[in-house]
Amino acid sequence: MNIATARINLRVSEEARDVIDRAAEMQGVDRTAFMLDAAVTRARSVILEDAILNLTSREVEQVRSLIEAEAEPTPALRRAAQRLEQLGL
């Protein structure tokens, strides 16, 4: 069980507060819970994006080589393409 002991103080415009309050009410949570969930969700997304997008120079070269290589489609890729074609996609 996580016990909240740290504080974050924040000043916002009345308009921003009202929008947040309205959305929190629609979700059935209080302002703090709504803001904390939104902030943590966004923070995790930023951290994940950074981890994915920050490739080493070796990894960049591997990706470049794969993109530039003229490889034949695998049987699985051919089957997937056929399924998409059957679906009209």
Image (cartoon, helix red, strand yellow):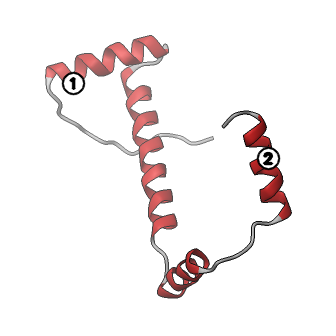
Label annotation for residue 43: none
Name the residue rendered at 53%, 40% in the picture: 3
Q: Which of 81 and 27 is in front in this view?
A: 81
Q: Which amino acid does label 2 sit on?
A: Gln
Q: Visible in this render: residue 5?
A: no
Identify the residue under disc 2.
82
Label annotation for residue 16: 1
Q: Distance between the residues labelled 1 and 2?
A: 50 Å
Tell me which numbered mark, 1 or 2, is placed earlier along the sequence. Answer: 1
SS state under label 2:
helix
Name the residue rendered at 38%, 17% in the picture: 23
**Residue 71, quarter of picture:** bottom right
Residue 38 spot, x, y in % from top left: 42, 35
Quadrant that contains the N terminus: top right
Residue 45 spot, x, y in % from top left: 47, 50
SS state under label 1:
helix
Name the residue rendered at 48%, 50% in the picture: 44
Q: Disc count in the image?
A: 2
Q: Residues within 10 Å of mark 2 (few under 14, many from 20)?
A: few
* Residue 1 as seen in the image, left or right of residue 57: right
Q: Which of marks 1 and 2 is in front?
A: 2
Residue 59 spot, x, y in % from top left: 55, 81
